[in-house]
Image: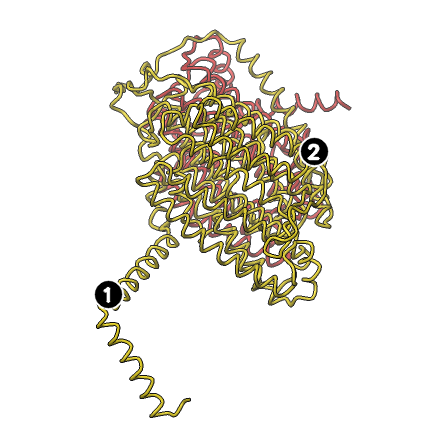
């Protein structure tokens, strides 16, 4: 499919969906799914292609260029597939709520603009799509009104700040190189000084870092993710913030070139080390903060911030193995995190909006499919072998260890161990433990929610066992960046200092599991017991009055909580307060009384005359 | 080739189970003797396993069963990754990093299985296990990173071979601090006193084990046996030079076990927050210094 047609289909499709919604709600839902199916098929057909298309030659005297290459392809495909899953998930979820036409329109618009961003070949079209994405995201975050408005405001203020910084960077690049087309910039940037390159990189890092929620630019993310409608949280967490990741890769590997990037600046104080440091902090702090959360979606949101740190670490490290790890982790994270938001969304849907982990429990008996999806999702998040997160994290750890950065590797590994704690908390509090009486009549998730959850769960497992599939595409994109590709096969990666071979691990785990299951079957048959029929050492467990998931990690969290103040958030709040006070001060001057303004003018003139008489300036 | 591999796998799995069960028996006997009691015979764990298998057990659901099988599978697979005195059936499949991750499966399986039981003691036990693991992983990760940085590999077989060439890691100058830190966290890894708060029989009725009876208890005991073996084997392979043959390896394993068993027999139990505080103080500090030393000397 041609790139122009692809964009026309998705953007036209979103408008058409909105209009069709005025006639028939059912037809609108089906059309939304069809549009994204077409987009998925269209993008899939572009596999392995590298081409450029001129969308329009003279928009404000700049050409608008579209291009496709393996690196854009994997992002575009992920966006389309996760978008499709989220739209299918919305079928039942959004029906209870109002303004559904608007919801579908914005949802498709966000997805279309993201596809637009990854397919852009110049900064102007990149910026246009970027702005469409930012504003439609704002409208969707604020969809639920009330608290969601505040969350949306926080998002859009930071987003606009990021866009402005990016605009400054673009203008500077244009004056320096005379073009906005990526290839032209790369060609003309060879002569640029190291200082200038670092300046440009930092400008764009602020813009992309806000989208990607790197510490200390992350503060918009936790409220936005928890207040947005759940299908959109999936999109937001799974792919939208990864557009920032895309920007990082594009800038470092596509425009500046990685050989230049790793040698920039002073040996210790350079932009690469700054990014690595921020990546490490982004892994560590949010992981610990996620431990303290009791709101399921907020916990996942903090986890998203932490996982973004892994991608930044992989991308900024600048070896082909680390880039593979970072990109693969983007891909994997998109699958398992959107899956997890759907799981929480399904629970929220059935329990009428309960997200508080302390008031759920035992739902495995009522929603077994949702539980299985959630379990696979958290396994992917932790990186349990046979799920996809394992390979991407392995690549990142391995490159950090063999290239002599043990402290970064330590932070990355420790982050994973924190992940286990909050992942288990999520699964345990929602699905395990005692089922409260009020949920005894709960129904399982509707089919429209099960289908995307099952699909994504399968994807998490398949790409965990066959990491060669995505790594093959990533290798193609690394060749496109002029880097040495990894030695991969279908089951894993071969390096000089350690290999990873999923075939062995998968065979051992499956065969071992089967043998032990048969062994287990050989024992005496067991009897089933009710949840209240359990051993309590002489102290019976009362039903419904016993919530033992509250303060699950209290001994640990009460120890670390004092050190985990979100200083960045406090700083921005103080800044906002300061600006408001200054604004209030300035407003006193503008009284609206003409007499006062005349007085100001006369005072100003008097000062000018005084200066002239005294110092003879003019 | 395939037959050799299959034989190796069977040999290592069975022998590690036997060793683990023997060590449980030995532990009970040693503790009893130090406490001036007679204690059960060494064969007691074997007798128990057979007995439990023939008893009717109570199950709380599908995950209750599956989690237990998953957990034991995880432990069995980890065993295949660890060199057993020159035999390592799954060498070249990812090395130490994979071992670290596979070691997660066993506690995760137990946690899921015990979670479905809806027993408050089981949940408290799991919560303690996860917190304790977080406590000692901080040091363990730094110790493993110092090893991997020092030997410049992620493969455990390579580390053992390097030690056969140049002597034990524990007595190599840059690694000795990390080795000391490892000694301090070993009781926590093995879950013995003073870090026994996960089971704490008198306090929370054996924690995660509270609901297990019959074949579940048999599986849980086998898993516990393998866990003891894995903890010791990792230490012996990484710091005591592994073994050039299986006998030599087992002797080192036994000696290391007896040292920690003496501590187990005479110490009281920490509370969980005391345990985490303790683990995050001296062992973490030592491990951090060790990592810095290795990092500086190898760069």
Look at chain B in the picture and name its colour: red
Q: Nearer the viewer, residue A348 or A47?
A: A47
Q: Is residue B288 above or below residue B201?
A: below
Q: Classify residue A436 by image quadrant.
A: top left
Identify residue for label 1: A592
Identify residue for label 2: B86
Query: Which element is circle 2 on?
Result: loop
| Relative side of B6 to A238, left or right | right
Q: Residue at x 55, y 52 (%)?
A: B291
**Placement of the C terminus of chain A among the 4 image quadrants:** bottom left
Look at chain A in the picture and name its colour: yellow
Q: Is residue B292 above or below residue B224?
A: below
Q: What colouring does the structure picture have?
A: by chain
Query: Which element is circle 1 on?
Result: loop
| Residue B179 in view here | no
Camera-near label (1 vs 2) is 1
Q: Nearer the viewer, residue B244 or B84?
A: B84
Q: Nearer the viewer, residue A295 or A157?
A: A157
Place of residue B149 in the rendered image (x, y in percent of width and height, measured from the top left)? 62, 50
Q: CA distance from mark 1 to mark 2?
A: 89 Å
Chain of the residue displaying label 2? B
Place of residue B254 in the rendered image (x, y in percent of width and height, measured from the top left)? 56, 32
Q: Residue at x 63, y 63 (%)?
A: A264
Place of residue A406 in the rendered image (x, y in percent of width and height, measured from the top left)? 58, 51
Instruction: Answer few, some or many: residues within 10 Å of disc 2's Cα (few below 14, many 20 plus, some between 14 and 19).
Output: some
Q: As drawn, which residue projects farthest toward the right?
A: B1
Q: Residue at x 51, y 23 (%)?
A: A30
């Amino acid at each position: 499919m041609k790139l122009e047609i692809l964009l026309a289909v998705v953007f036209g499709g979103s408008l058409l969906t909105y209009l069709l919604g005025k006639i028939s709600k059912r037809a609108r839902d089906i059309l939304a799914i069809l549009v994204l199916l077409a987009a998925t098929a269209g993008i899939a057909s572009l596999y392995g292609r590298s081409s450029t298309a001129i969308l329009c030659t003279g928009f404000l005297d700049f050409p608008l260029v579209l291009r496709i290459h393996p690196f854009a392809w994997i992002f575009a495909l992920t966006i389309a597939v996760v978008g499709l899953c989220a739209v299918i998930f919305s079928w039942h979820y959004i029906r209870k709520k109002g303004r559904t036409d608007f919801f579908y329109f914005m949802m498709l618009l966000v997805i279309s603009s993201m596809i637009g961003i990854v397919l852009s070949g110049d900064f102007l079209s990149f910026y246009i799509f970027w702005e469409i994405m930012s504003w439609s995201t704002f409208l969707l975050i604020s969809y639920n009104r009330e608290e969601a408005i505040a969350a949306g405001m926080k998002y859009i203020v930071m987003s606009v700040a990021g866009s402005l910084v990016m605009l400054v960077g673009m203008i500077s690049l244009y004056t320096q190189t005379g073009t906005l087309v990526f290839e032209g910039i790369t060609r003309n940037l060879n002569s640029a000084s190291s200082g200038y390159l670092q300046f440009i990189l930092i400008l764009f890092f602020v813009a992309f870092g806000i989208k990607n929620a790197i510490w200390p630019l992350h503060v918009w993310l936790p409220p936005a993710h928890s207040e947005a409608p759940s299908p959109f949280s999936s999109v937001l967490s799974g792919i939208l913030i990864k557009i920032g990741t895309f920007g990082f890769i594009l800038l470092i590997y596509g425009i500046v070139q990685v050989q230049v990037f790793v040698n920039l600046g002073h040996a210790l104080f350079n932009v690469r080390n700054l990014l690595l440091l921020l990546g490490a902090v982004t892994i560590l702090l949010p992981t610990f903060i996620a431990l303290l959360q009791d709101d399921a979606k907020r916990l996942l949101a903090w986890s998203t911030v932490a996982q973004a740190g892994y991608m930044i670490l992989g991308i900024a490290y600048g070896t082909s193995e680390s880039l593979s790890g970072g990109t693969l982790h983007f891909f994997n994270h998109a699958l398992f995190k959107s899956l997890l938001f759907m799981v929480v969304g399904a629970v929220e849907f059935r329990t009428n909006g309960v997200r508080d982990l302390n008031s759920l429990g035992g739902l495995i008996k009522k929603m077994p499919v949702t539980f299985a999806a959630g379990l696979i999702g958290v396994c992917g998040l932790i990186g349990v072998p046979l799920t996809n997160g394992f390979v991407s994290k392995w690549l990142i750890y391995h490159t950090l260890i063999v290239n002599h950065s043990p402290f970064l590797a330590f932070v990355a590994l420790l982050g994973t161990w924190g992940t286990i704690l909050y992942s288990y908390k999520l699964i345990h509090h929602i699905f395990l433990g005692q089922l409260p009486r009020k949920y005894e009549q709960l129904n399982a998730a509707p089919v429209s929610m099960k289908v995307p959850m099952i699909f994504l769960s399968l994807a998490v497992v398949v790409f965990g066992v066959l990491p060669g599939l995505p790594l093959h595409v990533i290798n193609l994109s690394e060749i496109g960046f002029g880097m040495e590709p990894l030695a991969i096969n279908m089951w894993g990666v071969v390096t000089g200092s350690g290999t990873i071979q999923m075939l062995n691990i998968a065979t051992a785990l499956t065969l071992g599991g089967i043998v032990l299951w048969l062994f287990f079957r050989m024992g005496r048959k067991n009897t089933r017991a009710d949840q209240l029929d359990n051993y309590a050492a002489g102290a019976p467990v009362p039903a419904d009055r016993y919530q033992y998931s509250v303060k699950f990690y209290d001994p640990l969290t009460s120890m670390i909580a004092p050190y985990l103040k979100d200083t960045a958030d406090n700083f921005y709040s103080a800044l906002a307060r300061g600006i408001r006070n200054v604004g209030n001060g300035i407003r006193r001057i503008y009284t609206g009384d003409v007499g006062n303004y005349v007085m100001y003018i006369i005072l100003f003139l008097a000062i000018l005359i005084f200066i002239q008489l005294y110092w003879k300036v003019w | 080739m395939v037959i050799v591999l299959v034989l190796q796998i069977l040999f290592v799995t069975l022998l590690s189970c036997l060793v683990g069960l023997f060590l449980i028996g030995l532990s009970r006997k040693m503790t009893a003797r130090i406490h001036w009691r007679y204690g059960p015979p060494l064969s007691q764990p074997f007798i128990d396993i057979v007995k439990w298998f023939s008893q009717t057990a109570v199950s709380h659901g599908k995950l209750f069963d599956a989690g237990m099988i998953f957990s034991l599978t995880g432990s069995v697979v980890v065993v295949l990754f660890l060199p057993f005195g020159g035999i390592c059936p799954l060498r070249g499949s990812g090395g130490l990093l994979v071992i670290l991750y596979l070691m997660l499966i066993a506690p995760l399986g137990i946690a899921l299985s015990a979670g479905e039981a809806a027993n408050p003691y089981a949940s408290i036990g799991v919560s303690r296990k996860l917190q304790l693991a977080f406590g000692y992983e901080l040091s363990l990760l730094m110790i493993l990173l110092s090893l991997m940085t020092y030997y410049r590999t992620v493969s455990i077989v390579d580390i053992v071979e390097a030690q056969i060439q140049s002597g034990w890691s524990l007595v190599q100058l840059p690694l000795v601090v990390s080795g000391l830190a490892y000694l301090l966290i070993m009781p926590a890894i093995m879950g013995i006193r003073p870090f026994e708060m996960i089971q704490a029989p008198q306090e929370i009725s054996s924690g995660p084990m509270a609901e297990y009876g019959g074949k579940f208890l048999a599986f849980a005991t086998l898993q516990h046996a393998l866990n003891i073996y894995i903890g010791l084997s990792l230490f012996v392979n990484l710091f005591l030079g592994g073994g050039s043959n299986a006998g030599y390896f087992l002797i080192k394993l036994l000696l290391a076990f007896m040292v920690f068993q003496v501590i187990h027999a005479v110490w009281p139990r920490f509370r969980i927050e005391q345990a985490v505080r303790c683990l995050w103080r001296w062992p973490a500090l030592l491990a951090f210094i060790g990592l810095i030393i290795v990092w500086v000397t190898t760069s």
